[in-house]
């Protein structure tokens, strides 16, 4: 809990987006592993909501995130908010990555909210959302090879003491902190703008907790909401 209590949002971010909130779910003593029947059911059930032709493209929360990306100079056709990118892949079926990643992807598309998952053991210092200077390191893969990139100055990024953990708010996560089949302690970040009411964010957070307990019944879960 002490690590979670140190997380913060820089005032410079809230000055631009005063309606932004982050729901943080810290889950300890997880049972990691490859995708299995439990994570498969959660993800398949979430995908099925859109297989019958249900429209999501004009969803107000998607529209709000696209507008936020544009306001920061990121064209959403090139840099899509994570939930937008996920929903576009539903007709062909989302990839099954591992049970923890599959679970948060299921919550993301079911509740139309960007969700990220990170391995707490890989963190150094507190999790925080800031505007980048452009000098921070971002560990990623390009052309199949590990590489280090840097965010654009002013870009909104999640980071720790070592560097950027997620670029463009929720566009792309780094390699260093990604969830794996060995992750035992994870933090899950649900990003909400004003188009998502607090009640809907609360429902998405509750769904995240339920999904984690379905895959890890003995997990110790703590939550915290960051808001202006």
Image (cartoon, helix red, strand yellow):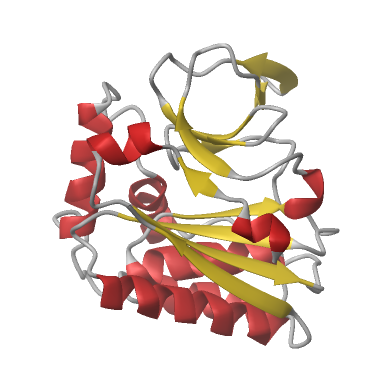
Identify the image quadrant of residue 100. bottom right
Question: Is residue 37 visible in the rendered structure shown here?
Answer: no
Q: In the rendered view of the protein, which quadrant contains the N terminus?
A: bottom right
The residue lying at 82 percent from left, 64 percent from top is 184
Judge whether 217 appears above or below 1 on screen.
below
Question: Is residue 23 visible in the rendered structure shown here?
Answer: yes
Name the foreground residue: 166 vs 95. 166
The residue lying at 27 percent from left, 33 percent from top is 69
Name the foreground residue: 38 vs 192. 192
The residue lying at 28 percent from left, 71 percent from top is 198
Estimate the x, y position of residue 142 in percent, counting from the top left: 64, 20
Query: What is the count of numbered marks?
Result: 0
Q: Residue most toward the right?
A: 182
Judge whether 9 appears above or below 79 on screen.
below
The residue lying at 69 percent from left, 70 percent from top is 27
Estimate the x, y position of residue 91 in percent, counting from the top left: 37, 59
Estimate the x, y position of residue 202 in percent, counting from the top left: 37, 76
Identify the image quadrant of residue 60. bottom left
Q: In this view, does 4 lie to the left or right of 106?
A: right
Judge whether 154 appears above or below 19 on screen.
above
């Amino acid at each position: 809990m002490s690590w979670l209590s140190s997380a913060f949002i820089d005032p410079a971010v809230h000055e631009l987006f005063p309606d932004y909130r982050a729901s943080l779910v810290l889950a300890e003593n997880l049972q990691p592993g490859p995708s299995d029947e439990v994570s498969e059911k959660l993800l398949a059930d979430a995908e099925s909501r859109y297989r019958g032709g249900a429209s999501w493209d004009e969803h107000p929360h998607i529209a709000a995130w696209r507008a936020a990306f544009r306001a920061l100079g990121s064209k959403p056709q090139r840099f899509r908010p994570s939930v937008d990118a996920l929903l576009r892949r539903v007709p062909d079926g989302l990839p099954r990555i591992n049970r923890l990643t599959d679970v948060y992807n299921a919550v993301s598309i079911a509740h139309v909210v960007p969700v990220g998952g990170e391995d707490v053991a890989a963190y150094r210092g507190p999790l925080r959302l800031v505007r980048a200077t452009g000098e921070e390191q971002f560990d990623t893969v390009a052309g199949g090879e590990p590489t280090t990139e840097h965010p654009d100055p002013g870009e909104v990024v999640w980071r720790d003491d070592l560097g950027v953990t997620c670029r463009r708010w929720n566009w792309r996560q780094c390699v260093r902190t990604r969830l794996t089949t060995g992750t035992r302690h994870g933090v899950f970040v649900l990003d909400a703008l004003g188009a998502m009411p607090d009640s809907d964010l609360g429902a998405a957070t509750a769904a995240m907790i339920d999904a984690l307990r379905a895959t890890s019944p003995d997990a110790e879960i703590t939550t915290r909401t960051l808001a202006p």
